[in-house]
Image (cartoon, rainbow, N blue to C red):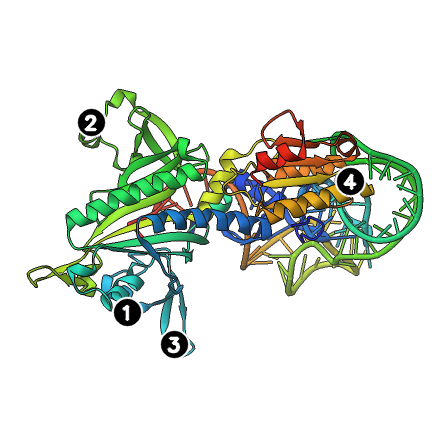
RNA sequence: CGGGGAGUGGCGCAGUCUGGUAGCGCGCGCGGUUUGGGACCGUGAGGUCGCAGGUUCGAAUCCUGUCUCCCCGACCA
């Protein structure tokens, strides 16, 4: 992508109506635009990041047998009446709407009620199990107060997966696989070292749920972390019994703040019972299917990464999810410089390396500041100097020093 | 929902207390000089001050109502 073509621009001014670092930076760099509280547009560069994150999540879900679908946002009232979740007393963050004929509908905040009856159409035997179905979809939650930029929105992108198992053993096996997949996801997103599995409330479904909490002072949750064991306990379930059950020495627990970047929990037969979702076992006896639920807020993960991996110059994206791998800063517009920069851009693009090519008629400082603010992992400078020296200047986003390399070495470094 | 703060060109702000029909910076257009860390000079365009009502000869400024945004708290199946 040539920056001269990109319709968004970075700004020297920080938005006044945001306090959260992630929102400030993402807006300043032109990645997102706020429509209203808790509702953001993803602009070209922001959408690339969002998609990159979603695709990593997809790969890991596929790797454990997840099958992707896309369910509607509009939700049938009767399904929620079946489970008792239509009531505003029970679910206080519903967005509800109506058809012109008056039929009430909901805007999905989760999809158990949509998927469970759907699965009933296909699954009837133990031979069909286990299965796991997921989607990457927009969720609507009428939060009393949205806040912190992408961290807590009213409309946000979420990956939600649901597993269906014949019995507890089969469920546990998949649950553990999902747990491992989640760990891999956060590692690939560049926040693995500070993300910990956390024992949290299982609600009305099970004893515990497992949250994945990324340590940050910007987080909303208070946790007690055992670095030694690499696990944490959410304050909401913290007590002596839990500590004992997990064989943790209470003295080593550290009180920290975390951002919930994922949550998995066992649903047991909470949804399969009311919908009559059962499978025949080997003896022909119908048994309720055991379900599990596995969520990751894709947009929240993006906000978390923006928040945590940034520095005083701007965003710092891990290579896996950056909107582009390379930023070509073309200094000046002498024919030799333009030619060389154009050729490098073509060459890298052909090698399927994503590039932001700063071909604008702007001063060097502006281009450097832009590259830093946007958080592009690698910067290549082409100028009269480098053309003359027959080198390319290479610099990582977080390194202080630039190096001069030959075209051959440059291509090698970039994997082209 | 309770408490606090704030709405003035695309963005960031001043002006409001002490009414007299808007000003600065960034950005943008044009001309020129520049070109290795968000350049400089000149020139120009762009707002009627969130919205509605009221007071007044006159309202960005005072009064009432209302909408929106941010923060803290409560809430987060």
Q: Residue furthest left?
A: A283
Report x, y in % for residue A346.
Answer: 66, 48
Q: Name the side, left or right, on which A207 lies relative to B16.
A: left
Counting residues from the start of the chain, the first of labels 4 and 2 encountered is 2
Q: A54 and A160: which one is in front?
A: A54
Residue neighbourhood size for the residue with mark 3, other residues' Cα within 10 Å, grouped as few (<14), some (14–19), many (≥20): few
Q: Secondary structure at mark 1?
A: helix
**Is circle 4 on the same chain as circle 2?**
yes
Residue beneath disc 3 = A102
Q: Is residue A147 visible?
A: no
**Is circle 1 on the same chain as circle 4?**
yes
State which chain disc 3 sits on: A
Q: Secondary structure at mark 4?
A: helix
Q: What residue is shown at x 68% (from left), y 43% (from top)?
A: A344
Disc marking residue A337? 4
Residue neighbourhood size for the residue with mark 4, other residues' Cα within 10 Å, grouped as few (<14), some (14–19), many (≥20): many
């Amino acid at each position: 992508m040539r920056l001269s073509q990109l319709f968004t621009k970075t700004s020297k001014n920080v938005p006044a109506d945001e306090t959260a670092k992630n929102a400030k930076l993402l807006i300043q760099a032109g990645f997102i635009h706020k429509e209203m509280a808790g509702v953001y547009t993803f602009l070209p560069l922001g959408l690339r990041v969002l998609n990159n994150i979603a695709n990593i999540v997809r790969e890991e879900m596929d790797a454990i047998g997840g099958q992707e679908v896309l369910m509607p946002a509009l939700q049938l009232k009767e399904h929620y009446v079946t489970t008792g979740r239509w009531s505003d007393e029970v679910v206080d963050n519903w967005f509800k709407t109506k058809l012109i004929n008056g039929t009430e509908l909901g805007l999905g905040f989760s999809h158990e009620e949509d998927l469970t009856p759907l699965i009933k159409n296909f699954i009837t035997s133990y031979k069909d199990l286990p299965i796991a179905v997921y989607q990457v979809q927009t969720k609507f939650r009428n939060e009393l107060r949205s806040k912190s930029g992408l961290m807590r929105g009213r409309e946000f992108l979420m990956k939600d997966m649901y597993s269906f198992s014949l019995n507890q053993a089969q469920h546990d096996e998949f649950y553990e696989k999902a747990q491992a997949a989640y760990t891999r996801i956060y590692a690939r997103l560049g926040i693995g070292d500070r993300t910990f599995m956390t024992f949290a409330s299982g609600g009305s479904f099970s004893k515990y749920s497992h949250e994945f909490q990324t340590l940050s002072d910007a987080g909303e949750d208070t946790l007690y972390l055992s670095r030694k064991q690499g696990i944490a306990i959410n304050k909401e379930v913290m007590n002596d019994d839990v500590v004992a059950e997990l064989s943790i020495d209470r003295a080593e627990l550290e009180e920290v703040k975390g951002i919930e970047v994922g949550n998995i929990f066992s649903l047991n037969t909470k949804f399969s019972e009311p919908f009559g979702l059962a499978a025949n076992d080997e003896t022909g006896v119908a048994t309720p299917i055991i379900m599990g639920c596995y969520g990751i807020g894709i947009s929240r993960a993006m906000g978390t990464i923006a928040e945590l991996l940034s520095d005083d110059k701007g965003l710092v994206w891990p290579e896996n999810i950056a909107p582009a791998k390379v930023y070509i800063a073309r200094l000046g517009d002498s024919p030799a410089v333009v030619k060389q920069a154009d050729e490098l851009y073509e060459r890298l693009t052909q090698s399927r390396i994503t590039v932001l090519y700063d071909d604008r008629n702007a001063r060097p400082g502006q281009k450097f500041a832009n590259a830093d603010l946007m958080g592009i992992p690698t910067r290549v400078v082409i100028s009269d100097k480098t053309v003359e020296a027959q080198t390319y200047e290479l610099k990582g986003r977080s390194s202080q020093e630039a190096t001069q390399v030959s075209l051959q070495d440059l291509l090698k470094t970039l994997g082209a």
